[in-house]
Structure formats: C-alpha cells, structure tokens
Amino acid sequence: MTVSAPTTDPALLARLHERLEALATGADAPDLHYRTVDSPIGALLVAATERGVARIAFEREGEQAVLQTLADRIGPRILRTPRRLDAAARWLDAYFAGAHDPFGLPLDTRLARGFRLEVLDRLRAVPYGERVSYAALAARTSSPKAVRAVGTACATNPLPLVIPCHRVTRSDGTVGAYLGGPETKVRLLALEATGSLPG
C-alpha cells in the first residue's frame, strides 16, 4: 500500500504566515525580522530589531550563515517578515536609482562596539560621491594612527550601503577590500560618481 504525502496549500501557508507576522509584536516580537531584497548587485539580506536595521548582508555571505551569526549575537527568535522591512527595501531601491540620501532609516548598531562603532560613526559623515582614504578616516577618530583597525572596522561593517564603507579607499587610489567583493565596490563608487550603476 502506498501512502502519499499530504499536499500543502501555498495560499493557506501564506495566510498563516501573515497572521503570525501580525501577532509578532510587543512581548511576542521576535529578536529579529528579516527579508531579502533583490538589487542590481545581487540579493541582499536585511535584518532588523525593534530599534532599527541591524544587518545588511551580501548574497556571497550566505543567508544561513548570516542568520546563524545574528541568532548567536542578537537572539535566536528570527522571523521572515518582508512587510516589516518595506522601508529598508525602499531605501535600497532609491539608493540604486541614484538618490544621494534617500531618507533617514532607523539603525541598530549593536553589532559594532568600541572603536569599530566609532569608525562607523565617522563613516556616516563621508558625503555621497566622495572618497576618503583609510588613513584620512583614521585621522578623524580618537586613534589617528589606527589605520589597520579602521580597515577592520570597514571590513566588518554590519550595515554596508547605509553606512558607506565603500567610500573608503587606499591612499594609492586603489579600492581595497570590500565585504561585497571589490568589483561591487567599484560599481558602487561608479554609481555615486555618475548616477547610474554600471553593468
């Protein structure tokens, strides 16, 4: 006798997930909400706490690896809630369409601490379309000779794009490393220089 597996109604599952999203507030809120956003540089994972967006991850980082790290560092209750992150998706869409400062986006910077957080604060002051060297950015911090530490802070920036570490380049003019890959960094710099993202 062959027993077939029960079929699952996708529409029913979608309605149940919507209900779960609606109920996940207050004391029942997850530690993190997340979604993926299609972009010209690949799928981006966006995760947020109740305070604001805490992580933007590139496709090359691996969704499961990023979610596991978030579970370990922020909390294990993670729920896929696309509509809760519509504002972040709109911000990214506007940025890739050439908007300089689309709009204020609440951020949760708890994944960076100490000097790394100070570097992220300085990064937020680097204007759209401008570049700064790692050494020049270090000079704006409390440890002006900590060029390598600035590089590490940029390399571990949990909020790329929104906190623009792609605007930091080497003193010799080369782009340097980037979590999304050096080719992505080149494309982002070109977007900010010309108003359109090269293919």
Image (spheres, rainbow, N blue to C red):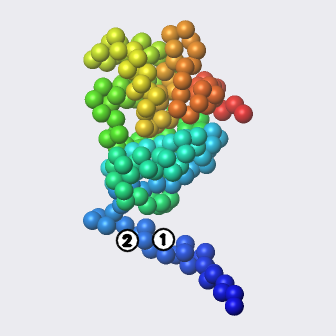
Q: Is residue 70 left or right of residue 129?
A: left
Q: Secondary structure at mark 2?
A: helix
Residue 178 rendering spot, x and y as whole percentages: 53, 28
Residue drawn at (59%, 35%), measured in percent from left and top?
98
Q: What whole-number distance in Å separates the C-alpha atoms at marks 2 and 1?
A: 9 Å
Disc 1 marks a residue whose amino acid type is Glu
The outermost residue toward the right is 199
Disc 2 marks a residue whose amino acid type is Leu
Q: Secondary structure at mark 1?
A: helix
Placement of 106 over or under 157, stated as above or below: below
Residue underneath mark 2: 23
Placement of 40 over or under 142, stated as above or below: below
Residue 32 rendering spot, x and y as whole percentages: 39, 55
Placement of 23 over or under 129, stated as above or below: below
Residue 199 rendering spot, x and y as whole percentages: 72, 33
- Give the image quarter of residue 12: bottom right
Q: Residues within 10 Å of mark 2 (few under 14, many from 20)?
A: few
The answer, for residue 81, to whether it is visible in the render is: yes
The outermost residue toward the top is 172
Ranked by sequence position, the earlier of labels 2 and 1 is: 1
| Nearer-the-camera pick, 31 or 91 | 31
Residue underneath mark 1: 18
